Image (cartoon, grey):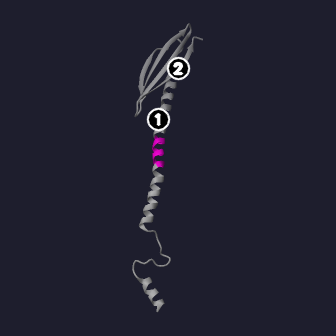
Amino acid sequence: MLRQLERRLRRLPGRPRAGRAGFSLVEIMIVLVILAVGVLPIAVVQHHARREVVEADRHTEAIALAQAQLERLKGLGFGNIVAENGVTGTFAWQAQVANVSFGLDRVDVTVTWNTSNAAEILTVSELVSMR
């Protein structure tokens, strides 16, 4: 008689059957909260890292532009270098020539560009001699 009662209780709807146990809604919600607390800081760090990479790329482009303009001006030869300026993409550049002493000039190439926070400025300088 006790066995018949156990069989009938097992057949009742809503009772988990052997081998079919699962997770309750509360357990799933706790796991989701733990995952959210763990993933959120990673997402924030990823966002900051992405912004820093973009900023570093812009800085690298500015250095390459300044060096290219400086080499172009040096290629003109001593005495032929003059102050110039121009715009390449989102970068504005300006070249200035200053006489340091007899037979020696300093060439400065300044590149400016805007970021989300402020304007950035980069200057590359080199000495050019008469010899």
Camera-nearest label, 1 or 2? 1
Give the structural element (helix, strand or loop) at label 2: strand
> Crowding at label 1, few (<14), some or many (≥20) Cα neighbours within 10 Å?
some
- The dot on residue 80 is none
User: Is residue 112 inside the magenta stretch?
Assistant: no
Q: Position of residue 131 (x, y in %)?
A: 60, 11
* Residue under the image location 45 percent in, 44 percent down: 47
Which circle marks residue 55 in the picture? 1
Asked whether residue 47 is drawn in magenta, I would say yes
The x and y percentages for residue 110 are: 47, 22
The reply to whether callout 1 and callout 2 are in contact (CB within 8 Å) is: no
Relative to 10, residue 63 above or below: above
Q: Main secondary structure of the magenta part?
A: helix
Relative to residue 56, is residue 131 drawn left or right? Answer: right
Q: Disc 1 marks which amino acid?
A: Glu
Name the residue tied to disc 2.
125
Mark 1 vs mark 2, CA separation in Å:
22 Å
Which of the pair 29/117 is nearer the observer?
Answer: 29
Which numbered disc, 1 or 2, marks the residue that appears first in the sequence? 1
Question: For residue 24, which quarter of the picture?
Answer: bottom left
Q: Secondary structure at mark 1?
A: helix
Residue 37 visible in the shown view: yes
Q: Is residue 80 visible?
A: no
Q: Magenta stretch?
A: 41-50
Residue at image coords 45%, 15%: 83
Q: Residues within 10 Å of mark 2 (few under 14, many from 20)?
A: some
What amino acid type is highlighted by mark number 2? Ser
Extreme residue in the right direction: 131
User: Could you say where residue 3 lies in the image, as x and y percent from the top left?
Assistant: 48, 89
Residue closer to the observer: 130 or 45: 45
- Which residue occupies the extreme front position in the image? 2
